[in-house]
Amino acid sequence: MGQRAAIYARVSTADQSCERQVNELIAFAERGGYEVFGIFKETASGASANRAARNRILDLAQTRQIEAVLVTELSRWGRSTQDLLDTLDRLAGWKVSVVAMSGMTFELDTPHGRMMATLLAGIAQFERDLLSERVKSGLAAARARGKKLGRQVGQRPKSDRLAPKVLALSAEGRSYRWIARDLGISKNTVADIVKRCSPSLAATEERAL
């Protein structure tokens, strides 16, 4: 029997289907002599960090239940070049390879795998440098236009967004403590919102305390 492999398929949106990827990977596994240990599918954007199916595969790899991960292309597995490099490194420590249908196999304990890892590391660093340069350039351009950066005095983006809910719940007679727990904010924030947005309601509640 061949290597135990997990099939991983991912689509970006709910109106897409993983079935084509799965069918192609099953055929690919048969041609390559892999024993399919499990099929894992999920819907998540390429940049999403919330990938339950991928995390389950990593758990299987860590516990030595699989020896390979089969994907149609590397972009289905990695969230970014750095993420791909990090997960490949983790998998290599567990003696698990990532095999793409394009013919690319990543095994970091081989000369070819180490060469690919070096190239990926260089690309990841280039991406970080490019992003940093774009951010700095954007900030400099904003300053040149006279725009003030960062949170300004008096701005309360989260509390302003939650203000309608806070006021509605307060008007229903809910306590500040109950509202704070329900909305995931502090009791002081609730009191501040009521005081700012509905002084008469705040005065009424203060008299009732």
Image (tube, helix red, strand yellow):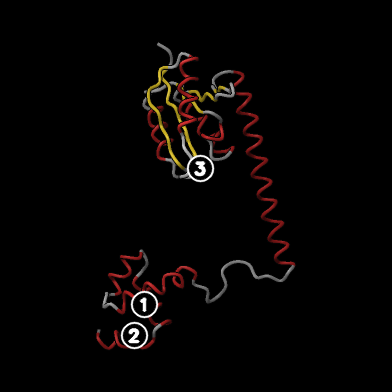
* Image quadrant occupied by the C terminus: bottom left
Give the structural element (helix, strand or loop) at label 2.
helix
Residue 71, given in percent of the width and then of the height, sits at 51, 28
Residue under pointer 2: 201
Looking at marks 2 and 3 on the same chain, the residue that comes earlier in the sequence is marked by 3
Nearer to us in this view, 16 or 142? 16
**Position above or below: 149 against 128:** below
Kind of residue at badge 3: Ser
Kind of residue at badge 2: Leu
**Position above or below: 199 against 161:** below
- Residue at x 68% of width, y 70% of height: 147
Give the structural element (helix, strand or loop) at label 3.
loop
Residue under pointer 3: 12
Q: CA distance from mark 2 to mark 1?
A: 9 Å
Q: Quarter of the image holding residue 43?
A: top left
Q: Which mark is residue 199?
A: none
Kind of residue at badge 1: Leu
Q: Which mark is residue 167?
A: 1
Looking at marks 3 and 1 on the same chain, the residue that comes earlier in the sequence is marked by 3
- Residue at x 39% of width, y 86% of height: 199
Looking at marks 2 and 1 on the same chain, the residue that comes earlier in the sequence is marked by 1
* Image quadrant occupied by the N terminus: top left
Give the structural element (helix, strand or loop) at label 1.
helix
Nearer to us in this view, 24 or 194? 24
Marks 2 & 1, CB-CB < 8 Å contact: yes
Q: Residues within 10 Å of mark 2 (few under 14, many from 20)?
A: some
Residue 137, given in percent of the width and then of the height, sits at 72, 56
